[in-house]
Amino acid sequence: MMNTYNPILELQRQRMLLQLEYVAEKEAFATMTETFGIERRVRRGDAWLNVRIGKCYYNSLNQRVVEVLRTQDQDIEHNFEFGRPVAIGQESGGGEGAKGSIQRNIITGTVSFVDGDRMVVVIPDKTDVLALQAAEHLFVQLSFDETSYRTMFDALERVMRSRGNRLAYLRDLFYTKQQAETFSFGDIRFPWLNATQERAVNEVLRAKDVAVVHGPPGTGKTTTLVEAIHETLRRESQVLVCAQSNMAVDWISERLVDRGINVLRIGNPVRVDDKMLSFTYERRFEAHNDYPQLWALRKAIRELRSRKARRDERYHQKLESLKGRAAELEIRINAELFGEARVIASTLVGSAHRLLEGMKFATLFIDEAAQAMEAACWIPIRRASRVIFAGDHCQLPPTVKSPVALKAGLGKTLMERIVEQKPEVVTLLRMQYRMNEEIMRFSSDWFYDGKVECAPEVKYRGILDYDVPMVWKSVEVEDGDVEWKEEFIGASFGRINKEEAALTLDTLEDYFTKIGKQRILEERIDVGIISPYRAQVQYLRSLVRKRAFFKPFRHLISVNTVDGFQGQERDVILISLVRSNDQGQIGFLRDLRRMNVAITRARMKLIILGNPHTLCRHPFYRKLYEYVEAMNGVSESP
């Protein structure tokens, strides 16, 4: 057995890189807050301006909360979601984000819940809410997330300090070539799964330490994971399921609930509806039969504390008695809720919640593991005996802001490390059910050594007869000079190409005209317009809204960044690549994993819009361009 790394040294290196990232993100956040006007932050989705403060109350978790209501800019997508820290502030001397206006933060809080233009924020008990409700020119903006970093640093420290326990064993196993242990029993048949999905479930069941389910686009990773969890629950009473983002936790939780599994979701969902809320801890807690009694006790405690009466021994006795009864009831309710649940679901950082204090699980499942920083994965691993990773390290990587930390390897995930060190624990799902074969082929060849195959039922799927599944629309170029240039509109907002955006919508309009309005509406043919640049996304959205032709189809068209389309699919996808310059500079389009996500969202038609003279200096884009041109019967290079 040969050790490749010293685990402790490697973890110390992780901590150092995380520290670099922490400083870089904190500085970037400070710069943005100090130098950008509030309206710029509103456009980025990081702030709401001129908010109204609604009612104030105590929620079922006994936290004091206020409603924050958005009154303008309702068409801008925002980045507020459960668990994110925010500041409520006030502008004076100009309002509306005017120059010369002074912004000051009044209180800080944490988002508990967001539904459209209504947000519920947990605030300190002593907040003067009446003054807040009466104030004008209020705004709410995201704050820097210290808690997540603190939780990740704590997790790394704990892993490094571990000696002679399961966590120390997993640490040493994950960082060396040491063989992972397995049980040996025959395959279980799952006739409703394909061969590689069936193999993946069996490998999960046989794993004593670790298994990886590697799911390329459209291969049914979630279906396989749900089956593996369902089958594991025939052997274990409860499992922990985590993912990097709230959205990924929602998605896997919903699929498990559909399978009839009792899920208890710690935290609130991104998409708010009765189905999603029904399995949240908060909703279950307040639906418990003993909750009204607990609420009455908590109310009595608050009233007693607010009285100005002399605080003698009798007062303290009464207070302690009420608190004791409330704590007893809360423990009883929690014991029942956690006792009934078969799956506890949370984000990776959310698994450090006080509700899970002291809990241990035989199995931890980490979904979208290739998008999670290593330090975040160690947060729930301390609660588990074995770990199952599911994801695709050829798709979206973790977000790393510090170029130095990224270059030094902070973007490398724990799942990737295990895939490299222990290929024997990895099962690649090979059969995809999303894309026409010609759309799939390029991604399969470039990213998966040609191992991904097409299910027969989707092989030739298309919308129009004799249609070519992939098209590359070149932006106009005259004599090699770029006529349609990209524009740079600020370091944090990225680039925009207005001519290419107009061409994108012209192209979609032409395609819709060919299909026919009636058919699009009857068959609900849906469309995704993707751009890697946020500024281009917002510009494209405004064009879709303004163009009368698209009015009947707006409910079928979504425009978003690559990250916004992760895990989704559409009948038709258009990708606006934006970059168009004489130097061949393509910036973060060099991150090919993002492009893998973009080109694999389409079921039947993929239209790429970009300047080949700029892009094709990079071998990936040259190969992609040639592949598409060959499909269209054109053999010339750009």
Image: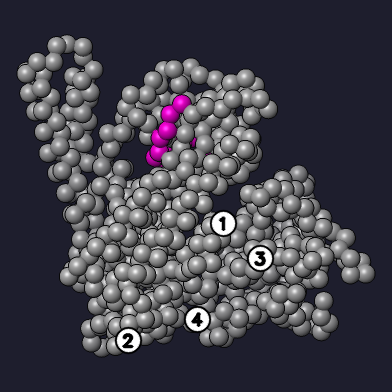
Q: In which image quadrant can residue 72 be found?
A: top right
Residue type marked 3: Leu
Q: Which badge, 1 or 4, comes first in the chain's sequence?
A: 4
Q: Is residue 319 visible?
A: yes
Q: Give the alpha-carbon distance from disc 1 to disc 4, as whole Å.
A: 24 Å
Name the residue carrying label 3.
589
Q: Give the alpha-carbon distance from disc 3 to disc 4, as whole Å.
A: 28 Å
User: Which is in the foreground here, disc 2 or disc 1?
Assistant: 2
Residue type marked 1: Gly
User: Which is in the foreground here, disc 2 or disc 4?
Assistant: 2
Q: Is 279 on the left or on the right of 332, as rendered?
A: right
Q: In which image quadrant can residue 291 be found?
A: top left
Tags 1 and 4 touching, CB below 8 Å:
no
Is disc 4 placed on a helix, strand or loop? Answer: strand
Residue type marked 4: Met
Q: Alpha-carbon neighbours of circle 4 within 10 Å: few (<14), some, or many (≥20)?
A: many
Name the residue carrying label 4.
431
Looking at the image, which residue is at 67% across and 73% down?
462
Q: Is 53 on the left or on the right of 553, as rendered?
A: left
Residue 528 % position (x, y) = 64, 59
Name the residue carrying label 1.
564
Q: Is residue 107 magenta?
A: yes
Is disc 3 placed on a helix, strand or loop? Answer: helix
Tags 2 and 4 touching, CB below 8 Å:
no
The residue lying furthest to the top in this view is: 309
Which contiguous range is marked in magenta?
106-119
Name the residue carrying label 2.
2
Q: Which badge, 2 or 1, comes first in the chain's sequence?
A: 2
Q: Nearer the viewer, residue 544 or 513?
A: 544
